[in-house]
Amino acid sequence: MQLSLIMVAAVLLGFVLNFLLAKVLAFSNLVRKTYFSYFTLLVLSFLLMFLDSKIAATFLLHIAKIRYYLILLLLLTLLHLMVKSIGLLFFDYFFAKRLLSVPRLLKDVVMFILYLSGILLIFNFYLNIKITVFLASSAVLTIVIGLALQDILGNIFSGITLNFERILKQGDWIEFGENEGQIVQFGWRSIVIRDLDKNQLIIPNQSASKSDIKLFGDGQGHYFLRMEIGVSYRHAPDFVIATISEVLDGCDQVLKKPQANIYVLNFDQSAIVYQIRYAIRDYAERNRIASEIRRQVWYAFKRNGIEIPFPIRNVYIRREDSSALSNSEKAEILGKIPILQVLDPEKFNEIAAKAEEVLFGKGELIIREGSHSHYFYQIVSGSVEVNKNRARVALLKSGDFFGEISIVTGEMANASVYAAEQTKLLAISAQLFRSVVEMNHELAEKFAEVIVLRQQETSKLRSASGATAIMKSQTAAKGKLLERIIKYFGIH
């Protein structure tokens, strides 16, 4: 009876200490995942107390035998509680708090060894079964079981070796034979990988340890990819490389560090082959990102007149693009822009004839915030999105124009512009404008007046202020812009 009371007190004290430790460590799992074991121990202790009482002796037979098995059950429950608490404290708390990643297989092995050691101690000291004698008498049985389970044991030990080497871990992308996928499970017997089509491949640990496995990435979350593009011999390599670099700079999914590299890879029969080496963060998105790069490269090549040739053995007839605008159509479109209406007809027609027709694909960067654009654009078809500090501030459609400040002041853009869909633009370069327009003080004043008037019309100032306030604001803005135009063109 005295022993039973001590056990009940010990269980209650243990639960209180466990609760206090969980509070101190702010680790609620220590209580939540062990309370059932404490409850079981308490119930078994009360049953043991009951068996030790005189009441049980009056109507129960074989009390000693029942007591024997009850204590055995209590010891096993106590073993489970101790091993569970050790696992929670070390693997789920201390290692996790120090951001140490412990493989699940290693945790399972340690827990198994603790359980096995506890059971052997119970066998030896409580059941009086000597383990050495037991193992010696069953040597033949051990050999038979070992031969039968050699593949399973081989997979288990191979898994332990792979976990200790810490080369592979859950989340890594690997190539095994002809299969490629992401590790989603690293278990006792096998490694499970999932490919892009969500199919799962189970690789036995023993096969993984004996075969060559390609591990993608540099271990720091950077995945490097390569892409080859053929370009006509008539285009200078430096110009082609610069054009591709602009595309990569405007693609958000391509990492800026490490920087992308572009090489002249080979001189083929019909093309110069360029290789693009770039890094991404999410390997699962590699096909979509590669597709986006190819799409934007096509549009960039189209705008810059860079040809992706057919094989040289193919005979084909080149035809002019029927969708190209004539000079009269360009003049009609540009003639609606107030800024160009201040020019005399001769200068205007020359600019209209030399305006470039460019095509941008959806999502392509047209103007980068904080950079020199050097172009003034008129939207022929499609639409563009104006972003400032990564927030959308306007959506411009066919008939709208943008970038007028750049050709009269040479200043950096204060917003980024992206193509919201496939968009055709007429582009007037600052160089063309300066070479054609003979800027003087009178013309500069007209430009300043027209630009400021347009800015006032598109702002919310008209609805928020009176006419006098608008006039004063317009006059001040016109004066400042006029000074910048005069300075940019060097008018004396």
Image (cartoon, helix red, strand yellow):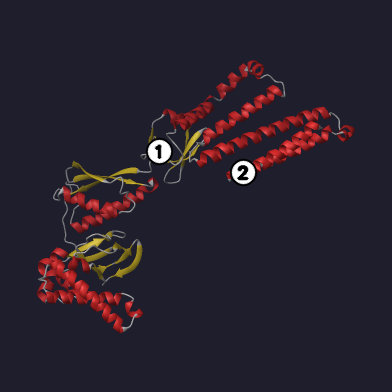
| Local secondary structure at mark 2 | helix
Q: Is residue 111 left or right of residue 269?
A: right
Q: Residue at x 18, y 69 (%)?
A: 484
Residue 405: in sight, yes or no?
yes
Q: Amino acid at mark 1?
A: Ile
Q: Residue at x 27, y 70 (%)?
A: 398
Q: Quadrant of the N terminus?
A: top right
Q: Residue at x 57, y 22 (%)?
A: 146
Query: Residue 22 got which mark?
Result: 2
Q: Residue 30 sits in which quadrant?
A: top right
| Image location of residue 388, percent across then percent down | 32, 64
Which residue is nearer to you in this view: 355 or 340?
340
Q: Is residue 62 left or right of residue 232?
A: right
Name the front one of labels 2 and 1. Answer: 2
Q: Quadrant of the C terminus?
A: bottom left
Q: Is residue 479 left or right of residue 25?
A: left
Residue 354: in sight, yes or no?
no
Please say if the residues under marks 2 and 1 sit with CB atoms less than 8 Å apart.
no
Whether 471 is drawn above or below 261: the answer is below
Residue under pointer 1: 174
Crowdedness near tag 2: few (<14), some (14–19) or many (≥20) residues, C-alpha within 10 Å: some
Q: Amino acid at mark 2?
A: Ala
| Local secondary structure at mark 1 | strand
Query: Residue 159 got which mark?
Result: none
Which residue is nearer to you in this view: 278 or 3?
3
